[in-house]
Image (tube, rainbow, N blue to C red):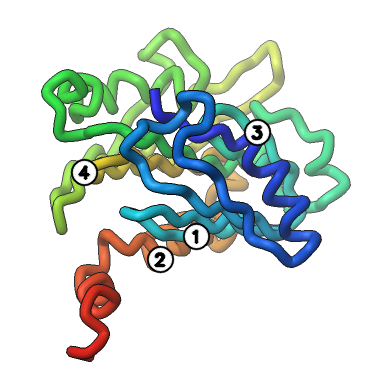
Amino acid sequence: MGRGNFSAIVRGARIAAAAGLVLLVPAILAGQVPAQAPRETVRFTSDALFFENGDYRFSVIFPQGCRYEEGPGTLDAVCSPDLDPEKGATVEKAGALVLSFSYELIDTTSASNAQRLSEAAFKEDLAESVCGESDKARARIENLKRQAEFGVISHHADVVCAEIKFLQIGVRRASVVQLIAPRGVFRLMARAPKEDFEKQTAAIDRPFSSFFQTFTVLQPEKRQAEKDPGKQ
């Protein structure tokens, strides 16, 4: 359903990055991206992912010292709480500092997608997608917000995940942002043990701030200047 294949894209991008190249990804990749989507460019460096297509351009910067786990349309940076590279290579994901980015290119204006992109659907999914809990009572949702600006709808929530005693994992905190643009859905999530979440605010903020500062659809002045450079 239009999800990017980070597993294939990122591996190729790493090879391209080592050679100083930019990886060009065809728009139609085994049916993973809608036929109307333009060609995508994905560049992956040691700590950042750069994405560009005909509608969107942005970068997501992760802290160094993490390992990466890739899935359909998803890239997770799994880090030890102190960002130690050796610990990050083996740390259990459930108790780690996890920074996640995902995207899906779909027609978000279609009525068929309205329900699953609603605020209610966003809230309903948080316990499982953030805490890994099927029991919604084990995920406390705070600061649930919805905003609309520049044609983009954003959902935000802070989540407190209950401790998992048999795994000796304490309470975890998380922040989640979902942006719904005309032809794509973008999601950022940060989760860590409660005490580490409060200590690693700079590392947690980095992927969020880099995305919002570079996501061109949220910068109408910049997009207009690109379309009509003569009027700068």
Position of 43 compared to 111: left or right? Answer: right
* Residue at screen point 50% across, 35% down: 4
Say which of marks 2 and 3 sits in front: 3
Look at mark 2 in the image and give the residue it sits on.
214
- Seen from the viewer's position, the closer of residues 80 and 74 is 74
Q: Which mark is residue 29?
A: none
Give the residue type that dot 4 points to.
Answer: Pro
Look at mark 4 in the image and give the residue it sits on.
182
Residue 18 place in picture, x, y as percent: 80, 60
Q: What is the spatial separation of the Cα atoms under label 2 and label 1, in whole angstroms?
A: 6 Å
Say which of marks 4 and 1 sits in front: 4
Residue 42 place in picture, x, y as percent: 56, 52
Number of residues whose C-alpha sits closer than 10 Å to that of mark 1, classed few (under 14), some (14–19) or many (20 or more): many
Look at mark 3 in the image and give the residue it sits on.
7
Give the residue type that dot 2 points to.
Answer: Thr
Q: Which mark is residue 59?
A: 1
Q: What is the spatial separation of the Cα atoms under label 4 and label 2, in whole angstroms?
A: 17 Å
Give the residue type that dot 1 points to.
Answer: Ser
Q: Relative to 121, is 26 above or below? A: below
SS state under label 2: helix
User: Of marks 3 and 4, which one's residue comes earlier in the chain?
Assistant: 3
User: Of marks 4 and 1, which one's residue comes earlier in the chain?
Assistant: 1
